[in-house]
Image: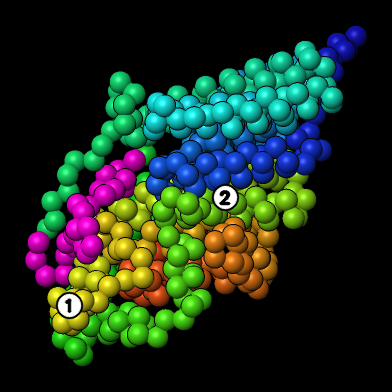
Amino acid sequence: MQKKLDPINILPFAKKYDAGIPTAWFSLLADLSKNTPFPPPQIARILSYSGIALYESVVPGMPSYQSMYRYITGNSIEFSNKKEYYWPACANAAIASTASRIIKSYNANADLASIQQMEASNNAAFLKEVSAEQLQFSIEFGKYVADVIYTWSTTDGTLNANGTLAGCSPYIPLGGLGNWVPTFPGFFPAAGACQGNLRTFYSNAVNITLPPAPPVYSAEPSSDFYNAANEIYNLSLNLTVDDIRLSQAWRDIRGNYNTPAHIAKLTSQIITKEHTNLEEASVIYAKTFCSMFDAIAAVFKAKFTYSLLRPITYIRNVMGFNNWTTVIPTLQHPSYPSTSACAAASAVHVLEESFGTEYAVIDSTQNTLYGTWTYSSLDGFLQDVGKSRLVSGINFRFSVNAGINQGRQVGQLFVDLPLKKL
């Protein structure tokens, strides 16, 4: 007599839920970056690990997908197929716990009231949908995922063994023609010299995507290098109101959405507009944010590999325009490639996978301060990010183009991740 097989327990599907929980969370985390001192690499790290925590907290309810954490690390996150998890609650707990702990690692005195309030408010709303028992074991799973992801995050090189932030050793400029030196007005030392040494989500992404060397340095007026600097100078003589507005909108300062936060807001707006479900949103957020983290690491690796001077140094010292200055202060690291262009390009490349190359966008992220921009494609949006670096005077065109190319290469690494089961 044939033995009767036990029924297979099938977990509820994540795609039956909308993406309201993660869109609210990532919009909030982007908002926090406006008024707290999280520079782009830090907010990208907060978003990326929170994005993976989201994905891992709902992937057991995504039968067509495999664990991203297991694919990258070889380790597993365990779950029970006998519990009917409520995926929005799992996601809520996972994002809240992961983001809170990473924020605390940057600032032990950080005010987490808005995070705690959103987490509690969501949990209260969930009780209208599920029992207290189901909510509790869903929260417990989300927090367990967060524990695993946060512990993993502590080993990427950001923290010392005792949990304190690991700083970069002082960067000593190389000296010599064409190499980076501190720039007007602050003449600050270089920042981010060790950013390219952090462990990336995609193994060896910083070397896989390293761009070719920039154009050969030359002070000759007939040279390509001189012409690149001269383009920046000539642009500065004919700036429009929109050029200045664009420069300011993409300035990474307190009060603005810096580049990763800006991308997070735009991504959430698109996901909301397209009524993307929880399954699809978790894939988009994880890939987009992890690609931005890796792109920033990769671009800094390239910057300090080539250590190229900034336009302001060349225009003042070689071209002789001693009082020339930029629309926004030049950032305190080498020019090649452009960080913002690279980070934005990696995200755009991932978003195009889901929404297409001809997807039109309205960017109202900085509407209150700088207005709204309308684009017929995501690439049009990306080209304006690059343009902001040209018209502001802080980057050469070849630095912008190299940043876009490098960012798209990083994005392709994540597009190709085999998260979906064959």
Find numbered disc 1 in the image and state the secondary structure of the residue it sits on: loop
Residue 300: x %, y % from top left: 32, 53
Chief secondary structure of the magenta span?
loop
- At a point 73% along the width and 41% down the height, the residue shown is 20
Task: Assess disc 1: are there few (<14), some (14-19) or many (≥20) residues with their C-alpha within 10 Å of its C-alpha.
Answer: few
Instruction: Answer whether residue 377 is visible to the viewer in this image.
Output: no
> Quick check: 120 above or below 265?
above
- Image location (x, y in percent) of residue 279: 71, 41
Please tell me whether residue 367 belongs to the stretch shown in magenta: no
Q: Secondary structure at mark 2?
A: helix
Taking the magenta stretch, the answer to whether it contains residue 181 is: yes
Q: Which residue is mark 1?
A: 322
Start and end of the magenta stretch?
A: 175-198
**Circle 1: residue type:** Asn
Q: Nearer the viewer, residue 248 or 174?
A: 248
Q: CA distance from mark 1 to mark 2?
A: 39 Å
Residue position marked by numbered label 2 in the rendering: 264
User: Front-most of 70 and 269?
Assistant: 269
Residue in view at x 71 percent, y 15 percent = 136
Residue occupying the far front of the picture: 369
